Image (cartoon, grey):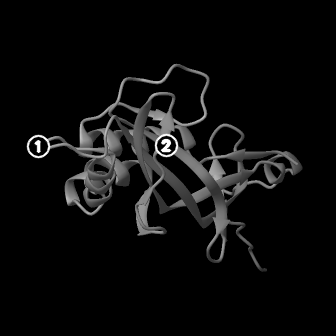
Amino acid sequence: MTYALATDFALIERALIAWAKATTGLPVIWAKQIAGRPHTPYLTLRITSDGRNEGQDSEQMEYNTTTGKLDTVTYGPRMMTVELTGYSETQSAAGQAGARQYVLQAVAGLRASRIYGEILRPSGLGFLKQLSDVLDIGEQLGDRWEARFQVDLEFGYTLAFTDKSTAEEGTTYIETVQPTVMIYP
């Protein structure tokens, strides 16, 4: 059996970064990557869970123009948990935003129609709910304090995958039918 994912996960990941940048104006990187840390303030994203099935999958037969046969395509609602963390030198200073404010600003931006319409919807991603409070996870780094605030968010999307084995087995699509004319004596 041959399965192919039709869901564009790279597009979903780019949309998550675009949302965080658009709402805060900060640099955004993926957490736990092998790269140097940017100067504060900045945000990190981490997909902590993905693919949780939240409903009934649906199967459809779709015509494959390449093979000329039918593929079975399965669609289903899936949930993704994303951890957003904000970093800054200090929690806040007079007139200066800190990590907490940046995280709250990004979360508030998820409810903005422009963010949804221009960034999330084209990727097939929808914001569902905030799963946790905005938590203070700051820590001492040597001789300085780094402010960190974190929140878990739930997004939904549609997983689509194609079973190409039906095409390999020879299921075909009938485009036209020639009627048989019966002449009775």
Q: Residues within 10 Å of mark 2 (few under 14, many from 20)?
A: few
Label 2, on which residue?
139
Q: Residue furthest bottom?
A: 185
Residue contact between numbered discs 1 and 2, judged by CB atoms under 8 Å: no
Q: Earlier in the sequence, mark 1 or mark 2?
A: 1
Give residue 54's quadrant in the image: bottom right
Is any atom of residue 60 visible in this view? no
Amino acid type at circle 2 is Glu
Residue at (29% x, 34% y) in the render: 26
Amino acid type at circle 1 is Gly
In the displayed structure, 134 sits above or below 98; it is: below
In the displayed structure, 178 sits above or below 103; it is: below
Where residue 87 sits in the image (x, y, percent)?
A: 39, 39
* Residue 112 horizontal side relative to residue 130, left or right: left
Give residue 22's quadrant in the image: top left
Residue at (84% x, 50% y) in the render: 165
Residue at (41% x, 61% y) in the render: 126
Where residue 11 sits in the image (x, y, percent)?
A: 48, 40
* Residue 93 horizontal side relative to residue 181, left or right: left
Is any atom of residue 69 visible in this view? yes
Mark 1, secondary structure of its residue: loop
Alpha-carbon distance for marks 1 and 2? 22 Å
Q: Which is nearer the eye, 163 or 118?
A: 118
Q: Residues within 10 Å of mark 1 (few under 14, many from 20)?
A: few
Label 1, on which residue?
95
In the displayed structure, 85 sits above or below 77; it is: above
Residue at (41% x, 23% y) in the render: 38
Q: Which is nearer the eye, 157 or 97?
A: 97
